[in-house]
Image: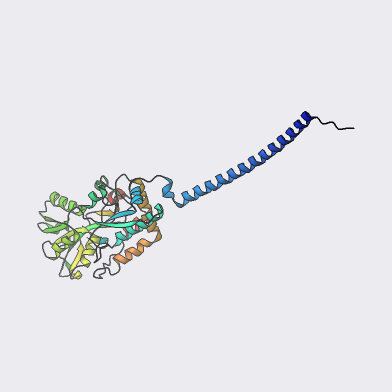
Amino acid sequence: MLYTWKPNAHRFMLYSLNERVRQRLHKKNKHVEENLMRIVRQLLGAAIAAAVIASPAMAEELTGTLKKIKDSGTITLGHRDSSIPFSYLAGKPEPVGYSHDIQLAVVDALKKQLGTDIKVRYNLVTSQTRIPLVQNGTVDLECGSTTNNVERQQQVGFSVGIFEVGTRLLTKVKDGAPAYKDFPDLAGKNVVTTAGTTSERILKAMNADKQMKMNVISAKDHGEAFNMLESGRAVAFMMDDALLAGEMAKARKPADWVITGTPQSYEIYGCMVRKEDAAFKKAVDEAIVAYFKSGEVNKSYDKWFMQPIPPKGLNLQFQMSDELKKLIAEPTDKAADEKKS
C-alpha cells in the first residue's frame, strides 16, 4: 500500500510526542528541585539548631548588663581594699580573696555564655560607695563582704549567698582572757565599727535602746577601724567574725587579740548586681551554683581561711561553719532573717 503524506496529521503527532517529552522532563526537573529544596531546608534547620545549642544566651535578645558586657567586651568588678580575706589588695593592683575567686568564676561562665572574651576592669569601692556605684552602672558586679538584707534589696539585686557570718567583737587579751567579754561590758566605752555596715546600724541601735552610753566610732574601712583598736583609741571593734579574724591575722601580735561576744546577728554575704536585671542575676546565680557544685569553693575556702595568706603569710585558722556548709549545699538569695523565718 502506498503511504500518503498528510502534513497536518503528522504535525499533530510530532507535537503530541514533543509535549509528552516536555511534561516528563518538567516532572523530572520539578522532582529534582523539590529534593534540592528539601535538602537545603534540612541543612538550614540543622545549622540553626547547632547555633542555638552552641550559644543559648543568643537565642534571646540580650538586654541590661549582659548586653552591655557583650557590646563593650568588658566587665567592671567592684572590689574592696581591706576586706581580708574576702576582697583586698596585697601589694598588687589586682584584688585577691575568697569573694574575688567567686567573681572570676562568674566572669569565666559569662565568657562561655556570651561566646566572647571579656576584659576585666577593677573599680575600688568602700562600704559607703559600693551600692551607689552598682546602681549608677559604674560597677557591674560587686563581690566582697556585702550583707544581703531586706533594706538593701530595695536598692540593688543580690546573688545567691556566698558566705555566712555572725557579728561579734574583737578585743585585747588580758590575763589570758578577753578584756571585754561581751557587749554589756562596753557600757561607757569607746567602740569602733566600720561606717556604712550593718554592724554600725546594730551597734548604734543597741546603744540607744539600752542606754549604754558607748562612744560609737565609725571608721572609713575595716583597716582604719582595727588601727583605732590597736592604738588604744577604742577598746573593742564590732564587725563580722570572719572579717575580725582577717584583721587579727594582720596585727603586729595576733596572739594579743581575741574574737568574743554573743553574735548580735547572722548575716549572709551576696554579690551585688543592678536591681531589676533578671537575666544578669540569673547568669550570676547559675555561675555561683556551678562553682559550689564543682567543689572549687572548698578549695578557695581552704586557701583563704586555713592556709597562710598574703601579704604577711598569716593563717586565719577559721573553720568553715555549719551555716556556710548548708548555704553551699542549698544556695539561696534570701537574707539571713528571711531564710530563718
When asked about the image quadrant of residue 108, the answer is bottom left
Q: Is residue 279 visible?
A: yes
- Going by the picture, which residue comes out furthest to the top? 8
User: x, y percentage for residue 285?
Assistant: 36, 52
User: x, y percentage for residue 310?
Assistant: 26, 68
Q: Residue at x 21, y 64 (%)?
A: 247
Q: Nearer the viewer, residue 4 or 297?
A: 4
- Going by the picture, which residue comes out furthest to the right? 1
Work out whether 43 lies above or below 297: above
- Residue 323 appears left or right of 190: right
- Residue 221 appears left or right of 65: left
Q: Is residue 289 visible?
A: no
Q: Quadrant of the N terminus?
A: top right
When asked about the image quadrant of residue 231, the answer is bottom left
Q: Nearer the viewer, residue 189 or 285?
A: 285
User: x, y percentage for residue 258?
Assistant: 20, 65
Q: How many marks?
A: 0
- Residue 128 appears left or right of 164: left
- What colouring does the structure picture have? rainbow
User: x, y percentage for residue 204?
Assistant: 15, 51
Q: Nearer the viewer, residue 100 or 161?
A: 100
